[in-house]
Image (spheres, rainbow, N blue to C red):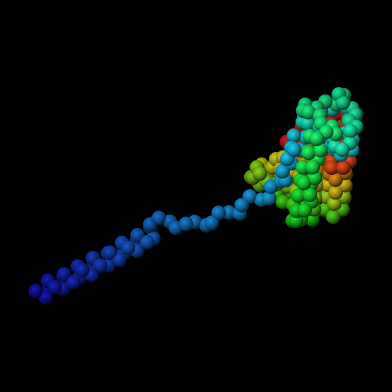
Amino acid sequence: MFASVRRTTRLSVVISCAALLLAACDIHTGPAGPGPGPGPGPGPTGPSLGAAQSYGILAGSTVTCVGPGSILADLGLSPGSAVTGFPTCTISGTQNVANAVALAAQSDLTVAYNSLAGRACGTTISADLGGTTLAPGVYCSTSSAGLTGTVTLDGQGNTNATFVIQVASALTVAGSVNLIGGAQAKNVWWQIGSSATIGGGSAMKGNIVAFTTITLNDNATLLGRALARNGAVTLGSNNTITLP
């Protein structure tokens, strides 16, 4: 009889231990808990151009083209009224000169310019961007800046990656912009405190938003926009401006 009781007791202990082990297994093999939280959100976006969105050229005083040349976009001028060199140079879009439409575009350009200029600087750039590779972000120069050779903008796999390059004074380009890692010209912004000069044969990419003037010398191309708030946009010969 006592032997039977001992066997029953041992069996109960084994069953209890098995139940405990099963519960432990349930704990460790059940559905996984929530994983890490979402990664960082998308970086800052570019400003809205509003009524200036469709313009390859927008100027404040004059627009001049030696030609031949091609602007695959709209052309606008306000408050000035002198547009010369057309139709030797051609535009694919609409020309708005000293009218309400051009005035509205200039007004929205001012808002975009102020938005770009007001962004906090993430990295101070050297006098020349040539030979450098930039990740998405806001870069600033406290004076003039140059681009001799090639600057590479790496989107790091993000097609919405935004690049803002703030130049306090003048920008002089004698080279090209290379886009990799999903970077797109429409998300590249050059905010220029005075004037931008794109040298002969240069291949520029991005939206040039200048306080005063923008000049494209012979054979220079721009995948982007030449938007000058107060001064002139001047083209040489064999220039092409294409909206990004």
The residue drawn where x is 75% and y is 38% is 51
Question: For the point 74% across and 52% down, which residue is it?
Answer: 138
The quadrant of the rendering that contains the N terminus is bottom left
The residue sitting at the front extreme is 100
235 or 77, which lies in front?
77
Q: Quarter-wise, where is residue 104 in the image?
A: top right
Give the left or right position of residue 153, taking residue 10 as reference.
Answer: right
Could you tell me residue 87's position as x and y percent? 86, 24
Q: Quadrant of the C terminus?
A: top right
Q: Residue at x 89, y 27 (%)?
A: 85
Q: Is residue 156 visible to us here?
A: yes
State the residue in front, 236 or 25. Answer: 236
Residue 55: give x, y in percent of width and height: 77, 35
Number of marks in the rendered image: 0
In the image, farthest residue toward the bottom = 2
Residue 185 can be seen in this image: no
